[in-house]
Image (tube, rainbow, N blue to C red):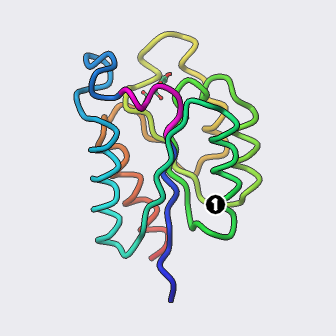
Amino acid sequence: MTERVVLLVNGPNLNLLGTRQPEVYGATTLAEIEAAVTALAAEFGLAVRAVQSNHEGVLIDAIHAARGECAGIIINPGAYSHTSIAIRDALSSVDLPVVEVHLSNIHAREEFRHHSFVSAVADAVIAGAGPAGYEYAVRHLAAKFA
Ligand code: DQA
């Protein structure tokens, strides 16, 4: 059987993790998060395709490419969570289980972060657990595939 692949998508500004507002987002870098997700996923027999972009269309293209190639999507859309109907529509279009992750608890922050367009099309939403949230997302997908 071919290995299941999980698409890990990180949106704008998340390339700066580690140095970006560490009091909000912590000291862990995106490379460290991607490595931890890849290692944990491997324990469940899952491969990871990691994509980060600051451009909405690149994120949408990556989501489209997951159709037929990936078994599920873990996405932190960053600020696009609060603005992008296009990313939500892309996620709806590919018909894959989606786990939305936010490092910070968006509900405890500014009002404009409380609503995410993505949440309604997500299977699960994890916010405020820091980098561990991505690992919980892997466990959620692995349990679904089991
Ligand atoms: C974020 C929360 C968003 O509001 C913010 O724009 C981000 C990161 C998080 O991981 O907590 O870029 O998605």
Image: 30 above or below 41: above
Residue 103 in the image: state x and y as whole percent.
37, 32
* Image quadrant occupied by the C terminus: bottom left
Image: 113 above or below 60: above
Region of the chain picked out in magenta, as a range: 10-16
Relative horizontal placement of residue 93, taking residue 137 as reference (left or right) = right
Mark 1, ligand 1, within 8 Å: the answer is no
Q: Depth check: 109 or 31 in front?
A: 31
Residue 13 in the image: state x and y as whole percent.
46, 25
Relative horizontal placement of residue 137, taking residue 81 as reference (left or right) = left
Residue 68 in the image: state x and y as whole percent.
68, 70
Amino acid type, mark 1 = Ala
Secondary structure beneath dot 1 equals: helix
Residue drawn at x 55%, y 20% as measured from the top left: 114
* Name of the residue lying farthest toward the left: 27
Residue 71 in the image: state x and y as whole percent.
57, 67
The verdict on residue 15 being magenta is: yes
